[in-house]
Image (tube, rainbow, N blue to C red):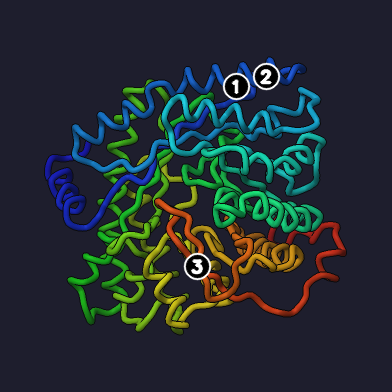
Amino acid sequence: MISQSEITETIRMIESEKLDIRTITLGISLRDCADSDGAVARRKIYDKITYCAKNLVRVGDEISIEYGIPIINKRIAVTPISIVAEPSGDENYVAFAQVIDQAAQAVGVNFIGGFTALVHKGFTKGDMRLMASIPEALATTERVCSSVNLATTKSGINMDAVKHMGEIIKETAFLTREKDSLGCAKLMVLTNAVEDNPFMAGAFHGPGEAECSINIGISGPGAVKAALEKVKDANFDTVAECVKKVAFKITRLGQLVAYEASKRLRVPFGIVDVSLAPTPAIGDSVARILEEMGLESFGAPGSTAALALLNDAVKKGGIMASSHVGGLSGAFIPVSEDEGIIAAVEKGALNIEKLEAMTCVCSVGLDMIAIAGDTSPETISAIIADEAAIGIINNKTTAVRIIPVWGKKVGEWAEFGGLLGRAPIMEVSKFSSRNFIQRGGRIPAPITSLKN
């Protein structure tokens, strides 16, 4: 049970340190909505989403008011649409994206994830059709998020998919060019994707999940920084213990919300994702935590070591506080969504190469990075390949959410709005990867994958 003293302390963290629940995400299986008639399948999809999620926003708001806990987002994740739509025989899946967008609007959530294909070992017809539909789907919907998993430690990297995704990202950027290529902010390319991730844009309800489930995404960078301010000049043993204790308290909050949402919605509790997810707001930054450890700026030498400590301590503290921890769990470093990271880019302390190094030890990968609109699709594909390699070799989830902002160059800014924030256009290598990407095929799984 969660004690009254724990709740009281947590309320203090909410009031003064920007602690919140970042998302309640309802996972919904759409496997029983597949049909040989696409129109019938879409009607089933709309009806099931609106039925299962009809009380999600209301319940989230009630819990927030009753406990005084800010719950920022209510979201939905569904079975990968490439699986659900494939039996229809439809050649284009944009209509499927539009119907889940309509369902999301009807129930009042801000995002719905699952316009997804799992292609780490190859393509089905449904996968190819979904991937080809991504640019138009993201250009013609408001709430839909899309993802493609193209590598795993067990299967290696599907380099044909890597090549396609560079082209798809460029096309998505063009079709949403009037909004600073915003469509790319809703598209994530994954390695070792997990099936219970509550965070967008990579969320989907995996084939191994229950009919429905409640997954909670927590946050709390401000609470961690405030705790570290009390142990200035302490050694790293003390720093790690401090972070672990705060992560425990934050995760207990997530567990409370998970239990309440599960009970009131009559949906099984899935997991709490123990993550530090920043926002553009001052005081809600992962970068500022690392600077509190003694770095002059996020991105300075030592940043990777500091992030490794933070990520590990968050997981160690969180796993003791919840009966089921899952998702991505750790610390996110999205450029446009963290004011401290933006400041580091502005002052020249951070570049994409340093960010890539830091993704070896954080929760996700290269996230919400704006680059020049004239960047070649092969360069984007090569960045994806590098991040996928980090994922398969280290047996961890990695991702790329990169935005070639149409018509803008290094030194200019992209404006995405809301939690997506704003980002400076970052420089990428001028050297070509074209011949490398054109090879295609598969990069084999690493020897460490052979554990059976």
Q: Label 1 belongs to which residue? A: 45
Depth order, front residue of 405/203: 405
Q: Is residue 96 left or right of residue 424?
A: right
Q: CA distance from mark 3 to mark 1?
A: 38 Å
Q: CA distance from mark 2 to mark 1?
A: 6 Å
Residue 26: x percent and y percent? Answer: 45, 32
> Quick check: marks 2 and 1 in contact, CB under 8 Å?
yes
Point out the frontmost of discs 3 and 2.
3
The image quadrant of residue 450 is bottom right
Q: Is residue 451 visible?
A: no
Question: Mark 1: which amino acid?
Answer: Ile
Asked if 361 appears above or below 257 in the picture, the reply is below
Residue 334: x percent and y percent? Answer: 47, 61
Density class for disc 3 (Cα within 10 Å; few <14, some 14-19, many ≥20) is some
Mark 3 or mark 2, which has the lower sequence index? 2
Residue 260: x percent and y percent? Answer: 29, 30
Q: Label 3 belongs to which residue? A: 413
Q: Is residue 221 visible?
A: yes
Mark 3 or mark 1, which has the lower sequence index? 1
Q: Label 2 belongs to which residue? A: 41
